[in-house]
Amino acid sequence: MDNMAAERIRADIIATDVVLYMKGTPVFPQCGFSAQAVQILNFLKVQFKGVDVLTDPSLRQGIKDFSNWPTIPQLYIKGEFVGGCDIMREMFQNGELEKVLQAKGVSYAPPQKTA
Amino acid sequence: MAMEINEIERLIREALPDAKIEIKDLRGDGDHYAAHVESGAFIGKTLVQQHQMVYAALQGRVGGVLHALALKTSAPMAQQQA
């Protein structure tokens, strides 16, 4: 794998609590799956850094190698790979994502429980 | 162009012979699928590991020729969430 890309990823996920590797930016996602991932994080009011892999081909491949994960988006919390879009959605729906955020001491706003 | 449901199912079953596999072609275009895979091999694995096992079974096709595969995995009895 491209060592520069791996180094950059390692530095990013250590420096920032929540990092989302995605296509496009949090404001302008370039893919429906990345948009969903952003939506979930925004809904929980989690502060995160979006890294646009489309701006850097070595990063686009590098993050797949780094995580051993073939698709984008990819979510890292406190340096740990949490999953892609499907896992994020599943964990969001069953409340696991909140548990992970809480366990790792990342601040978020619990969704209002409404009927 | 894309992949057939049969081919996806065959590759998953090769790696996970006990798997219950349900695949839907979401748009009828042979390119956007949703799959639910249940296998005893997932017991004790995290969701990330379970998905990685399915991706490994598909031998590099996910994210390549197989553009979109919405994946849900579970262990039998369903109490095995990591």
Image (cartoon, coloured by chain):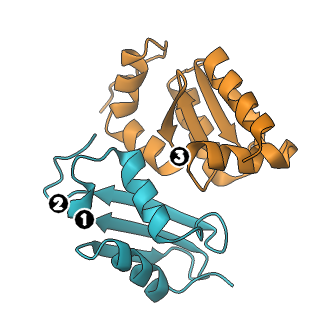
Chain colours: A orange, B cyan
Quick one: label 2, few (<14), some, or many (20+) residues within 10 Å?
Answer: some
> Does dot 1 land on a helix, a strand or a loop?
loop
Q: Label 3 belongs to which residue? A: A84
Callout 3: chain: A
Q: Label 1 belongs to which residue? A: B39
Residue B31 visible: yes
Residue at 52% x, 66% y is B69
Q: Amino acid at mark 2?
A: Pro
Q: Amino acid at mark 1?
A: Ser
Residue at 33% x, 44% y is B46
Q: Is residue A72 above or below residue A26?
A: below
Residue A111 visible: no
Q: Is residue B11 above or below residue A14?
A: below
Question: Residue B55 location in percent, x, y?
Answer: 49, 63
Which corner quadrant of the image does residue A13 belong to? top right
Distance CA(mark 3)–CA(mark 1): 20 Å
Distance CA(mark 1)–CA(mark 2): 6 Å
